[in-house]
């Protein structure tokens, strides 16, 4: 099935560093969602985006809905050890709002 | 507190056995979903239900069955026909008519021995 191109696949950073990850699609999306999953747990919604160009923050996290409607990015500022986990993007294709398309995740490790 | 409860958290089964995973939500959400998660493959949709007594196949429904007799409950049965059932199973729900802002349970890990 259709998948999003999420990058990078993994990151290993030092505590205090900023992090950036992104997702791209081949079709136009009308919704972008960013989730975080910790080991053995279900994903937790971090940020939801609904309009092209929209920039939304949640604490140290900031996400944007790309102008072309085919991409989105997530930034984490001043990373801390509890930021460790897998970050997933998910999007709703404008031509098929019955499905949510998922990226394969970005695994983040933070060295204290 | 409102949320989604999945049980059991861990389940072991022998080949050829059917198992049922429970999913209960008290969020008053109409729509519920089952996903399967394998390492490196992201989330894949098994089944979903937008209203009671109705459900639809997702991308990988073969070998699975569901029921939706109550708004709060959406159990998933992994049948013996599922050739590779060992995986992490996630249940989700949403208040919206379309798939967005899914709230997930904590997952159930099924291992076939």
Image (cartoon, rainbow, N blue to C red):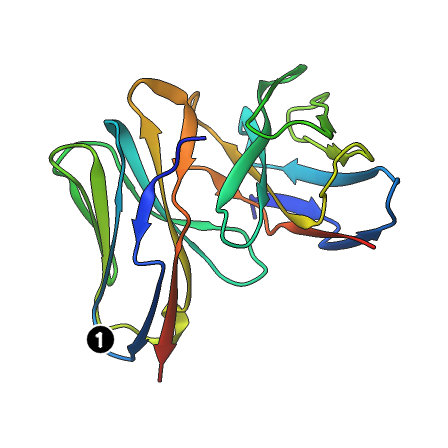
Above-or-below relation of A41 to B79:
below
**What's the residue at 27%, 36% (across, down)?**
A25
Q: Name the residue under label 1.
A: A17
- Foreground of the two, B5 or B13: B13
Classify 10 Å Cα crowding around label 1: few (below 14), some (14-19), many (20 and above): few
Pinpoint residue B22: horizontal percent, then vertical percent.
73, 40
**What's the residue at 21%, 40% (across, down)?**
A71
**What's the residue at 53%, 34% (across, down)?**
B93
Above-or-below relation of B46 to A108:
above
**What's the residue at 67%, 38% (across, down)?**
B24
Question: Does any portion of residue A18 appear in the rendered image?
Answer: yes
Pinpoint residue B55: horizontal percent, then vertical percent.
62, 18
In the picture, measured across the screen, residue A5 lies left or right of residue A36, that is left
Pinpoint residue A44: horizontal percent, then vertical percent.
45, 51
In the picture, measured across the screen, residue A6 lies left or right of residue A28, that is right
In the picture, measured across the screen, residue A39 lies left or right of residue A112, that is right
């Amino acid at each position: 099935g259709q998948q999003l191109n999420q990058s990078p696949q993994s990151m290993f950073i030092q505590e205090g560093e900023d992090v950036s990850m992104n997702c791209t699609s081949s079709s136009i999306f009308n919704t972008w969602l960013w989730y975080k999953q910790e080991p053995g747990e279900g994903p937790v919604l971090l940020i939801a985006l609904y309009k092209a160009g929209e920039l939304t923050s949640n604490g140290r996290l900031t996400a944007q809905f790309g102008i072309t409607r085919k991409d989105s990015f997530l930034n984490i500022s001043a990373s801390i050890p509890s930021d460790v986990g897998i970050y997933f993007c998910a999007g709703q294709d404008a031509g098929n709002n019955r499905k949510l398309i998922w990226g394969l995740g970005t695994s983040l490790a933070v060295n204290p | 507190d409102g949320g989604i409860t999945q049980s059991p958290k861990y389940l072991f089964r022998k080949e050829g056995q059917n198992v049922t995973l429970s999913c209960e939500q008290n969020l008053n959400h109409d729509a519920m979903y089952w996903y399967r998660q394998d390492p490196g493959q992201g989330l894949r949709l098994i089944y979903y239900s937008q209203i009671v007594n109705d459900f639809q196949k997702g991308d990988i429904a073969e070998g699975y069955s569901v029921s939706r007799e109550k708004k709060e409950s959406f159990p998933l049965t992994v049948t013996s026909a599922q050739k590779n059932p060992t995986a992490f199973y996630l249940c989700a729900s949403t208040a919206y008519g379309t798939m967005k802002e899914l709230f997930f349970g904590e997952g159930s890990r099924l291992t076939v021995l």
